[in-house]
Amino acid sequence: QVQLQESGPGLVKPSETLSLNCTVSGYSISSGYYWAWIRQSPREGLEWIANIYQSGTRFYNPSHRSRVTISVDKSRNQFSLTLTSVTATDTAIYYCARRSFGGQKYFDYWGQGLLVTVSS
Amino acid sequence: AIHLTQSPSSLSASVGDRVTITCRASQGIENDLGWYQQKSGKAPTLLIYSSTTLHSGVPSRFSGDRSGTDFTLTITSLQPEDAATYYCLQDYNYPWMFGQGTKVEIK
């Protein structure tokens, strides 16, 4: 059974850097699929942030491209998100998810979500 | 960016009713649209992908259709457990975009 679990701070101060991890179990990241970060806030709804392929190929939402980095650690079967210079508008539930690769396109497994609040 | 206009934003229906939710893309996205269900406090779950393909394990009362850039999610006989918010997602090209959601309530 594939499972994803987000981890990271629940509270971050404005202007600081947010770092989140997603630990994948039941499937090897090296075996394929895209791995993605998605967030959800009352203001923006569901918003795709970035995804990475096991080869390291990355895609970013242009809305956040200058502040976001996605990376993968195959040895730990984890992937990560870094978001710099956070503001209150980055307050959201952050989800990690597995995304198919190829003709059939879907997010089939999601983490439970991690609430991140940006506040001093 | 390709935007999705989802309607209605909310609806209230009775058990057994037929419910239809629409998602209109701002430009052609072929069949690259999925539907997701999100129950309160939970992560979204996949219902339909490639506009019409039912994900494994999803009840057959859910179905998807496409006409040009208009996509529909239909629940043929609404059940109490279908109370949720439904989102469409276009992953035809980057940036992938979600619709604003439709909240379905049971009368």
Image: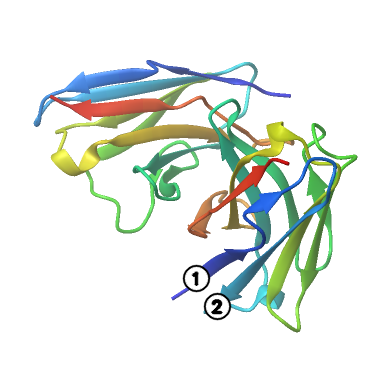
Q: Residues within 10 Å of mark 2 (few under 14, many from 20)?
A: some
Residue A99 visible in the shown view: no
Q: Quadrant of the N terminus of chain A?
A: bottom left
Label 1, on which residue? A3
Q: Residue at x 23, y 39 (%)?
A: B82
User: Closer to the N terminus: mark 2 or mark 1?
Assistant: 1
* Mark 2, secondary structure of its residue: strand
Residue B6, numbered circle:
none
In this view, the residue in front, B86 or A21, is: A21
Residue drawn at 84 percent across, 64 percent down:
A56
Q: Residue furthest front?
A: A120
Q: Locate residue A36 relative to residue A87 in the image: left or right.
A: left
Quick one: SS at disc 1? strand
Query: Of the residues shown, which amino acid type is indicated by label 2?
Result: Ser
Q: Is residue A81 visible?
A: yes
Instruction: Answer with the quarter of the image where residue A27 lies.
Output: bottom right
Mark drawn on residue A25? 2
Q: Quadrant of the C terminus of chain A?
A: top right
- Mark 1 and mark 2 in contact (Cβ < 8 Å)? yes
In percent of width and height, residue A43 lies at 58, 25
Q: Chain of mark 2?
A: A
